[in-house]
């Protein structure tokens, strides 16, 4: 993307396209949605690409000063071209710069005339980008003059990039502009932005902060700074030491509001989830016209069903501006009007039948522990949406439980549904402190510790078969995908590994992306490290040298060890450092040739064999093969045996590398024609896999053998194309040519679908076809 912005790839691509085309661009966003950061990144990118850039911004305190905003454009341009202006130009520019119109002009004409002469100055060279941030805060006269300037033409390209709040976009943007909308960040990018803030927030406090920020970047940054290290309760009811800076920063948003608007704003600030507009108006006691006015001013925003502060951080500041008694009253008013509101009488002031949102407001208003409110929350937990919200509701119920045994039970239940490991451990510790966690909660804590890379601590808790099984998986044992004990994200990795082995690298990429997103949202540190390592392996397989050079983020353990060795070995191999590549694979085995660690997918011996040939270390590798009890197929790779039976049993990449290796040997032995066949076969396989680095090597070798890499090479002396295939490949190709799918072929030949795919993968380059759609025509022609 070329910037450090998160979650803006599509918008950035549109911006670059529009800038390159010379379009006028309007970027529209709500409060706190990263508009200024986006425009700043655009300005930096334009500078790096050779544009001249002038950056101006509207300010609240200058809104009533006519022409103030435009001075930020006029003065820098005036300084840049002062030496080449004519006397008349200089006079017009001075009038605009000093806000003193010449005779016969009003201020608008003077500003437009002076600015236009600067933009049209003959001595100005190169494209000019004018970036205007917060156009809605510019004085109206400057905004009108900018619109006039944007409609004119200039000798050298001038592009306007305007940023404006959504509620003023229709009034201020020009007709025909390219408009780019900035929405909230997706959940995964919001979580990543919070991670970048280097703040210490527990799982539950983190959830509440992200809930309140609603994907708006500025709110995430401001709230993270305000609540760094805060417990969950402090995000709702912080002490003054945390609340004062945030409240003071947004005091201007509330200053000067009339009583009705202020009452509405404070009621909105007390929302806990998606309370609807009707409930907000009923609780605040103000008419709908007040809401309409607050939305028009940009203070609030609504989608017709719900209403929120346009800037979430301002909403938190408004809530914090209330006293503790005022906050409790706000929540009481919500609890009274929401669906499922509790029934109160003089003899029964609290009941346990409140709806989920009403129960949450009861809890927020509570002055201390209350079993009726705790029970209402516990019952409401089954009706909330999402496991994290359910965990939050149960944890709240535990906090309000007078009986420690009830608190321990509720904390344990919360631990079973909480997502982030740090939150699970926080809840498990709370349950232990109140009399003891349940067995299931302890199993969940073991998983959380393992996910955080703390397997030694997990071992102290793993006194249960399920907990011990989880610990074994993290220490290197591959999970059984059918095992009901592990319906966990860790199963992404066996899936991705199997797809890599089958040569389905694009599908593996998709699985790793899904796992990567989950690791960021749920804070799964070990999973994130494993995904990064497996991505490096995939980069190495593709011959991407830079991406394969892994920088581990934690000490490798379990299956990570094999992947680290594999990624580093493949990076060296792709770089032509064959001895180093061999050493990486050799270091995976001890001096006696036995594996030091688990090899999840059995590739280490295959790559050891292949790199041994290139590094002239066949003897040493042979001793490892003997100690490891290597299969005949792996030994065949080491010995240069390229019989179809040996190659067909190898994985797609191993087989392609073997063909490449053999082709190079044949070329160096001056057996040019068979060398071309082997190299062409290797090239086709590499291209099919997407192994760009290895494909380049095969092309270079083909050119050295006097062949055109763009043309398939037929096997010498072949008449029937099927003669080039092994018997098994022949059977598979004949059935595929008849239109049978892989699953049908596998059923007929009693083979796995992976084997069928491998046979076809190796057959296509031998037959000179690009895929199964060409098989029938090729056989008819033969």
Image (cartoon, rainbow, N blue to C red):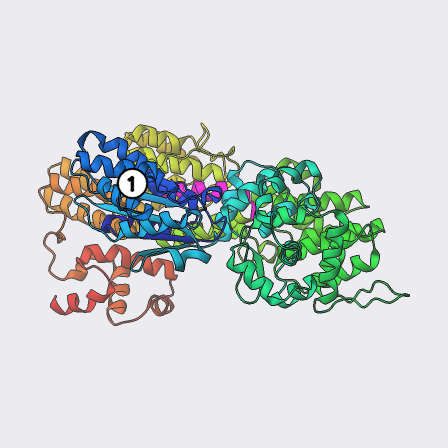
* Whole-percent x, y for residue 47 in the image: 29, 37
Q: Depth check: give the residue in front, 507 or 98.
A: 98
Residue 308 placement, left or right of 614: right
Q: Depth check: give the residue in front, 382 or 35.
A: 35
Q: Is residue 423 above or below residue 87?
A: below
Q: Is residue 665 magenta?
A: no
Residue drawn at 39 percent across, 38 percent down = 567
* Whole-percent x, y for residue 520 in the image: 51, 46
Bounds of the magenta segment: 522-539
Q: Is residue 568 above or below residue 684?
A: above
Residue 99 placement, left or right of 598: left
Identify the residue position indicated by label 1 in the image.
46
Residue drawn at 60 percent across, 47 percent down = 255
**Total numbered badges shown on the rendered structure:** 1
Task: Name the image quarter holding residue 723.
Answer: bottom left
Q: Is residue 486 visible?
A: yes
Quarter of the image with the C terminus is: bottom left
* Whole-percent x, y for residue 370 in the image: 83, 55
Neighbours of disc 1 within 10 Å: few (<14), some (14-19), many (20+): some
| Main SS category, magenta section | helix
Q: Depth check: give the residue in front, 505 or 398.
A: 398
Quarter of the image with the N terminus is: top left
Which residue sits furthest right?
347
Q: Is residue 161 above or below residue 377?
A: above
* Whole-percent x, y for residue 718 in the image: 12, 57
Q: Is residue 532 magenta?
A: yes
């Amino acid at each position: 993307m070329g910037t450090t912005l998160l979650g803006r790839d599509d918008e950035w691509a549109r911006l670059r396209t529009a800038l390159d085309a010379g379009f006028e661009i309007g970027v529209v966003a709500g409060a706190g949605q990263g508009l200024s950061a986006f425009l700043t990144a655009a300005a930096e990118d334009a500078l790096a690409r050779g544009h001249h850039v002038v950056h101006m911004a509207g300010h609240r305190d200058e809104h009533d000063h006519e022409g103030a905003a435009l001075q930020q454009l006029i003065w820098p341009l005036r300084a840049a071209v002062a030496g080449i202006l004519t006397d008349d130009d200089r006079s017009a520019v001075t009038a605009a710069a000093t806000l003193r119109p010449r005779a016969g002009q009003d201020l608008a004409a003077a500003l437009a005339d002076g600015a236009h002469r600067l933009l049209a100055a003959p001595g100005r060279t190169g494209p000019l980008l004018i970036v205007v941030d917060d156009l809605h805060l510019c004085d109206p006269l400057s905004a009108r003059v900018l619109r006039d300037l944007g409609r004119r033409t200039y000798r050298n390209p001038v592009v306007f990039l305007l940023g404006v709040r959504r509620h003023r976009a229709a009034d201020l943007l020009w007709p025909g502009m390219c408009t780019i909308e900035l929405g909230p960040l997706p959940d995964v990018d919001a979580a990543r932005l919070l991670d970048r803030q280097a703040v210490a927030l527990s799982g539950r406090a983190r959830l509440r902060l992200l809930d309140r920020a609603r994907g708006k970047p500025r709110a995430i940054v401001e709230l993270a700074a305000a609540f760094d290290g805060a417990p969950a309760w402090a995000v709702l009811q912080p002490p003054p030491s945390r609340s004062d800076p945030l409240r003071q920063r947004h005091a201007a948003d509330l200053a000067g509001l009339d009583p009705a608007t202020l009452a509405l704003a404070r009621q909105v600030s007390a929302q806990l989830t998606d309370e609807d507009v009707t409930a907000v108006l009923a609780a605040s006691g103000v008419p709908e016209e007040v809401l309409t006015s607050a939305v028009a001013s940009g203070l609030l925003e609504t989608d017709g069903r719900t209403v929120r502060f346009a800037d979430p951080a301002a909403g938190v500041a408004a809530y914090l501006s209330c006293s503790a008694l005022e906050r409790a009253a706000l929540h009481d008013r919500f609890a009274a009007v929401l669906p499922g509101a509790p029934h109160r009488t003089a003899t029964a002031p609290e009941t346990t039948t409140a709806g989920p949102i009403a129960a949450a407001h009861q809890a927020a208003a509570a002055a201390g522990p209350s079993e009726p409110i705790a029970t209402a929350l516990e019952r409401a937990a089954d009706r909330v949406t999402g496991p994290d919200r359910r965990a939050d509701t149960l944890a709240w119920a535990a906090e309000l439980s007078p009986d420690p045994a009830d608190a321990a039970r509720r904390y344990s239940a919360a631990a079973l549904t909480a997502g982030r490991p740090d939150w699970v451990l926080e809840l498990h510790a709370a349950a232990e402190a109140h009399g003891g966690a349940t067995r299931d909660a302890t199993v969940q804590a073991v998983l959380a510790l393992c996910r955080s890379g703390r397997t030694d601590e997990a071992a102290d808790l793993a006194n249960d078969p399920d907990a011990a099984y989880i610990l074994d998986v993290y220490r290197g044992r591959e999970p059984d995908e059918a095992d009901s004990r592990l319906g966990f994200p860790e199963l992404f990795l066996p899936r991705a590994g199997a797809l890599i082995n089958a040569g389905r690298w694009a599908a593996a990429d998709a699985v790793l992306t899904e796992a990567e997103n989950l690791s960021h949202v749920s804070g799964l540190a070990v999973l994130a490290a494993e995904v990064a390592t497996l991505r490096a392996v995939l980069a190495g397989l593709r011959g991407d040298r830079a991406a394969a050079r892994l920088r581990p983020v934690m000490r490798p353990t379990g299956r990570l060890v094999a992947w680290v060795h594999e990624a580093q070995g493949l990076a060296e191999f792709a770089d032509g450092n064959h001895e180093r590549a061999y050493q990486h694979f050799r270091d995976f085995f001890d001096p006696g040739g036995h594996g030091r660690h688990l090899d999840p997918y059995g590739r280490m011996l295959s790559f050891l064999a292949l790199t041994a040939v290139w590094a002239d270390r066949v003897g040493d590798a042979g001793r490892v093969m003997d100690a490891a009890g290597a299969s005949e197929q792996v030994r065949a790779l080491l010995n240069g045996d390229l019989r179809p039976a040996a190659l067909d049993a190898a994985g797609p990449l191993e087989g392609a590398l073997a063909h490449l290796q053999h082709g190079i040997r044949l070329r160096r032995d001056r057996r040019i024609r068979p060398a071309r066949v082997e190299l062409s076969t290797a090239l086709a396989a590499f291209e099919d896999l997407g192994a760009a680095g290895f494909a380049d090597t095969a092309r270079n070798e083909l050119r050295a053998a006097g062949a055109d890499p763009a043309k398939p090479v037929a096997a010498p002396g072949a008449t029937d194309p099927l003669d080039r295939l092994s018997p098994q490949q022949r059977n598979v190709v004949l059935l595929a040519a008849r239109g049978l799918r892989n699953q049908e072929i596998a059923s007929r030949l009693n083979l796995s679908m992976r084997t069928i795919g491998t046979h076809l993968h190796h057959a296509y380059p031998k037959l000179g076809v690009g895929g199964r759609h060409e098989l029938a025509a090729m056989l008819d022609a033969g």
